Image (cartoon, rainbow, N blue to C red):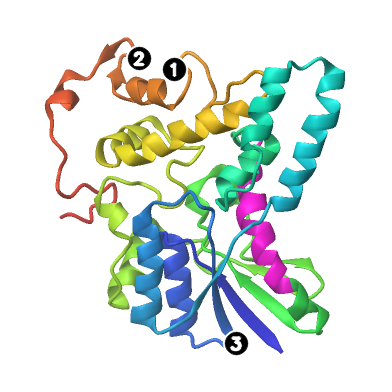
Amino acid sequence: MKHNIVSVSGGKDSTATLLLAMAWDVENLQAVFADTGHEHPATYEYVEYLEQILEIQIQRVKADFSFEIESKREYVKTKWPEKGVSNSVIENALAVLKPTGNPFLDLCLWKNRFPSTRARFCTSELKVKPIQQLFYPILEDGHMILSWQGVRADESLDRKYLPECNEVIQGLYNYRPILKWSAKDVFQAHTDMGIDPNPLYKQGMGRVGCMPCINCNKDELKEIAKRFPEEIERVAEWERIVGLVSKRQSATFFTSDYRGHGIHQLVEWSKTVRGGKQYDLVEQMTGIEACSSAYGLCE
């Protein structure tokens, strides 16, 4: 028996992929959403919207790092004193080394750091592995899985050379049906099926998913800070908490460099021009547009 499982993130590409699977009326269709705990509330609402309008259940999965955090607590208690770490630093770490129930934050507590472009463990730990847990029982029963992925070649150089379909292990195949699609094609699929895109695409967001993503660019960060300051404050609080489990007592969501140290300084940098030397005065005087889209959705 073949199982068609679509990974849904609430973004445009995964939504178009789900719409395509439904249009083709594929057998044994399942949809799954990996909750990272780092999405904007509008994305959670959008996943519920898709369930209602498409009349399909989207299964939620979440990573659980309780075991890893408990192991980390034991390591801090027994090994850090041997390494000469001060009692105050150890006490600070143990005070926050407890599962919060938020997958992203718990992952960072376990790793004592935030993911980065060079150590991008977030995707595998928060999305890939939790979804794979659904695959194993099906594969063990001898069934085949077609894992539908909303990946497009023009998104990045790495994705440009991906095959449309490849075998991962016996019985499990990654399938990328919209690999050659453009962003315009993706939104057209929404229109054709009578589905609204995630509202964040009309609020200045070029990508939808983690907010912010570790790969967030300067303009995206500026737009997030302008429209959703509460998300910046959440990240700032996470920096404080994760910093307490670090021997250096400091952790930053984005790499500290010439742009600054910590999310608040990075937000200030995002407002600048001329290599960060001065503020964009025109931008500072411009209010928040009711509708702003990198994809022309407001036209």
Say if residue 247 shows up in the picture.
no
Q: Position of residue 182 (x, y in %)?
A: 40, 58
Q: Earlier in the sequence, mark 3 or mark 1?
A: 3
Task: List the residue tagged with mark 1.
Answer: 259
Q: Position of residue 175 (x, y in %)?
A: 62, 69
Where residue 62 is drawn, which disc sits there?
none
Amino acid identity at mark 3 = Asn
- In the figure, is residue 36 to the left or right of 232? right
Closer-to-camera residue (297/210): 210
Task: List the residue tagged with mark 3.
Answer: 28
In percent of the image, x 42 and y 34: which residue is there?
A: 217
Q: CA distance from mark 3 to mark 1?
A: 49 Å
Labels 2 & 3 near each other (Cβ < 8 A)? no
Q: Secondary structure at mark 3?
A: loop
The answer to which image quadrant residue 274 occupies is top left
* Within-10-Å neighbours for mark 1: few <14, some 14–19, many 20+: some
Amino acid identity at mark 2 = Gly
Closer-to-camera residue (101/163): 101
Labels 1 & 2 near each other (Cβ < 8 A)? yes
Q: Secondary structure at mark 1?
A: loop
- Judge whether 151 appears above or below 229 on screen: below
Q: Earlier in the sequence, mark 1 or mark 2?
A: 1
Q: CA distance from mark 1 to mark 2?
A: 7 Å
- In the figure, is residue 185 to the left or right of 298? right
- Judge whether 255 appears above or below 74 on screen: above
Q: CA distance from mark 2 to mark 3?
A: 52 Å
Say if residue 151 shows up in the picture.
yes
Task: List the residue tagged with mark 2.
Answer: 276
- In the figure, is residue 212 to the left or right of 289? right
Stretch in magenta: 118-135
